[in-house]
Every structure is written in C-alpha cells, then in structure tokens.
C-alpha cells in the first residue's frame, strides 16, 4: 500500500502537467475553430458557386481525414516544407481544423442560421 502511494506521489506532477496541457490545447482549439468557422461558413453559403464549391470540398476533405492523420501531416509535412512545428502547434492546427468542421456540419445551422437571421433583420430595418 505504501509503495502505491509513493508511486502516485512520483507521477502526480507529470499527470498534472499533462492535464494542464490538455486543457490549454482544448480551449485554444475551440476558440480558434470558432473563429475559423466564420469565414468558411460565409464562403460555403456564398452565392458565388466556385467559392462555395471550394469551401464544401475543403469541409469534406477535413471531415473525411482522421485527426491523427492531420496531426502527422502537420508535424512531418511542415518539416519537409522547411518549417519546424512543435508537437503542440501541429496538434493545435489539426484540432482547430477538425473542430471547425464540427461547427459547420455536426451542429447544423448555427452559423448559417445566424447569417440568414442577420440578413432578415437588416432587410427588415431597411424596410
């Protein structure tokens, strides 16, 4: 019993550091993905068909690629291109892209409905 308590005492700082990094990465990814979703949604509902098709293709590529594969591409692909990303930054970029597609697809209508509602309010005010 005392050896188990000693083991917990030795690994607790490492676990706490991992918890902090996980929370930091999660909060940053959620905030950045919400910001990134706005231009993608506006482009995907654009009346200009080529822009909308590019945005929808982008959404489908991100949606159909596992997040772990995206992390590998970000981390190892950046080195090939001459930019050295840390694991944290590569993970943040991949999670931001992956979460952004959640805002657009899996929570249907949040941003498009808001954009449509803003257009209706603006039209109503202009009379």
Image: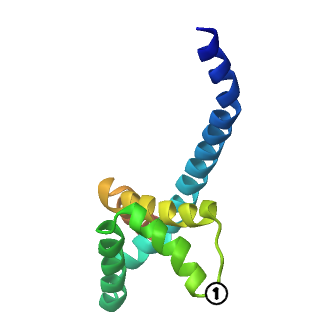
Residue extending furthest toward the top: 1
The residue beneath circle 1 is 82
Residue extending furthest toward the front: 3
Q: Judge from the rendering whether residue 1 lies leftward or rightward of residue 63; answer left or right.
A: right
Q: Is residue 114 above or below residue 14?
A: below
Along the line of sight, which residue is nearer the eye, 68 or 41?
68
Quick check: can you spot residue 41? Answer: yes
Quadrant of residue 3 in the image? top right
Q: Is residue 3 above or below residue 80?
A: above
Q: Residue at 62% across / 60% down in the picture?
A: 88
x and y, in percent, of residue 106 in the image: 31, 55
Q: Residue at 54% across / 66% down in the picture?
A: 93
Along the line of sight, which residue is nearer the eye, 91 or 97?
91
Element class at badge 1: loop
Q: Looking at the figure, which quarter contains the N terminus?
A: top right
Q: Is residue 20 above or below residue 113?
A: above
Quadrant of residue 79 in the image? bottom right
Quick check: can you spot residue 45? Answer: no
Q: Which colouring convention does the figure follow?
A: rainbow
Q: Judge from the rendering whether residue 78 lies leftward or rightward of residue 71; answer left or right.
A: right
Q: Judge from the rendering whether residue 91 lies leftward or rightward of residue 102; answer left or right.
A: right
């Amino acid at each position: 019993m005392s050896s188990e308590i000693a083991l917990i005492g030795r690994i607790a700082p490492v676990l706490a550091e991992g918890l902090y990094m996980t929370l930091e990465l999660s909060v940053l990814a959620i905030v950045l993905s919400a910001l990134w979703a706005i231009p993608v949604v506006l482009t995907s509902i654009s009346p200009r068909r080529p822009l909308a098709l590019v945005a929808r293709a982008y959404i489908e590529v991100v949606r159909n690629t596992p997040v772990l594969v995206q992390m590998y591409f970000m981390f190892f692909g950046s080195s090939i291109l001459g930019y050295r990303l840390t694991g944290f930054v590569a993970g943040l970029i991949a999670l931001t892209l992956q979460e952004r597609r959640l805002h657009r697809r899996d929570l249907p209508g949040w941003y498009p409905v808001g954009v449509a509602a803003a257009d209706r309010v603006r039209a109503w005010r202009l009379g």
